[in-house]
Image: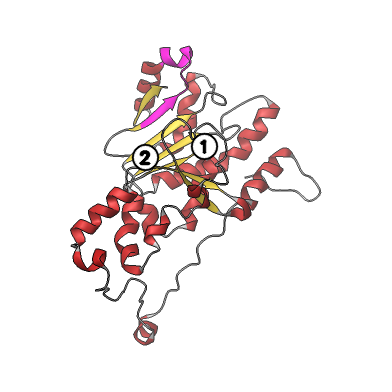
């Protein structure tokens, strides 16, 4: 990350500071108590609730049936993570019908009920018991899609660590204007250098996700047009990503990449980068 010099502001400085200034506020750190203080402190009641015999849903149905309901209501979705005004993170549930503004590179509609960020959380916020039963399926059974590398690193400190580690499927679309690769063009170098820390931080966040089972990196054709030999350099920060099944790399469907798929796949394997290469 470039340091901003006193009285000197380059485009690299502006981009670097923009990344820092747009970061959302992190969750407050939980206090660490000593053994003596824990004996005198009050017990944590956030996950405790009283029985509700008046509720047919909670009192009549078994926990197994309720869990099936939560999974049907909350699971199997594609969730776009977006940043809103005032450095707030939000989500948009993709309709997966081809009419999604976010999928087409736009911004979510203001009148979209899911765009308010409370659509999926409405059920969990009903009461403590439903929250305790339904919050983890929300993270484990959905695919989280990030259209900007900044959004992924921004989301991580805004949710509890155990929720972050519960995420199993992530899709990342490379939409940042420039990336970290060697370049002699002075104009491009500004973007590459400014994007270096964001990309490395993003890869570090992905490789540290304990529950991750599926990861897809989609490189947009509008920005990514690098020679084959540079792709391993770009993917080097993801070397430590080792999943049960190889993660997916989707290159732009250009004749150049289509012809070189086998060479790219072989070169990445030699370098210890375990991914499945496709041109889409």
* Residue that numbered label 1 is attached to: 102
What x and y, as percent, mark residue 155? 49, 51
Residue numbers of the magenta segment = 248-260
Between the C-alphas of marks 2 and 1, the distance is 27 Å
Q: Earlier in the sequence, mark 2 or mark 1?
A: 1
- The residue lying toward the viewer, choosing from 7 and 25, is 25
Q: Is 274 colored magenta in this rendering?
A: no
Q: Residue furthest right?
A: 7
Report which quarter residue 180 is drawn in: top right
User: Alpha-carbon neighbours of circle 1 within 10 Å: few (<14), some, or many (≥20)?
Assistant: some
Q: Is residue 66 above or below residue 195?
A: below
Q: Is residue 42 above or below residue 227?
A: below
What x and y, as percent, mark residue 73? 32, 50
Q: Secondary structure at mark 1?
A: loop
- On screen, residue 97 versus residue 175, left or right, reads left
Report which quarter residue 150 is drawn in: top right
What x and y, as percent, mark residue 105? 55, 33
- On screen, residue 278 versus residue 180, left or right, reads left
The disc placed on residue 139 is none
Q: Residue furthest bottom?
A: 40
* Residue that numbered label 2 is attached to: 241
Query: Number of marks in the image?
Result: 2
Q: Residue at x 70, y 28 (%)?
A: 186
């Amino acid at each position: 990350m470039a340091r901003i010099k006193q009285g000197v502001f380059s485009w690299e400085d502006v981009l670097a500071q923009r990344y820092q200034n747009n970061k959302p506020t992190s969750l407050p750190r939980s206090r660490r108590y000593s053994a003596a203080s824990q004996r005198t402190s009050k017990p944590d009641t956030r996950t405790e609730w009283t029985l509700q015999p008046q509720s047919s849903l909670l009192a009549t149905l078994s926990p197994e049936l309720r869990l099936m309901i939560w999974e049907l209501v909350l699971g199997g979705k594609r969730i776009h993570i977006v940043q809103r005004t005032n450095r707030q993170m939000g989500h948009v549930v993709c309709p997966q019908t081809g009419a999604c503004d976010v999928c087409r590179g736009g911004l979510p509609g203001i009148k979209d009920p899911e765009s308010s960020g409370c659509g999926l959380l409405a059920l969990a916020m009903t009461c403590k018991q439903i929250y305790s039963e339904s919050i983890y399926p929300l993270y484990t059974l959905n695919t989280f899609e990030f259209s900007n590398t900044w959004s992924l690193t921004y989301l991580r400190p805004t949710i509890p660590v155990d929720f972050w580690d519960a995420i199993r499927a992530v899709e990342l679309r490379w939409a940042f204007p420039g990336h970290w690769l060697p370049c002699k063009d002075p104009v491009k170098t500004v973007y590459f250098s400014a994007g270096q820390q964001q990309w490395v931080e993003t890869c570090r966040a992905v490789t540290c996700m304990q529950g991750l089972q599926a990861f897809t990196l989609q490189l947009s054709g509008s920005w990514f047009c690098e020679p084959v030999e540079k792709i391993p350099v770009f993917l080097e920060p993801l070397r430590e990503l080792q999943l049960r099944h190889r993660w997916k790399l989707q290159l732009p469907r250009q004749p150049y990449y289509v012809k070189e798929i086998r060479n790219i796949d072989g070169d990445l394997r030699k370098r210890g980068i375990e991914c499945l290469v496709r041109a889409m």
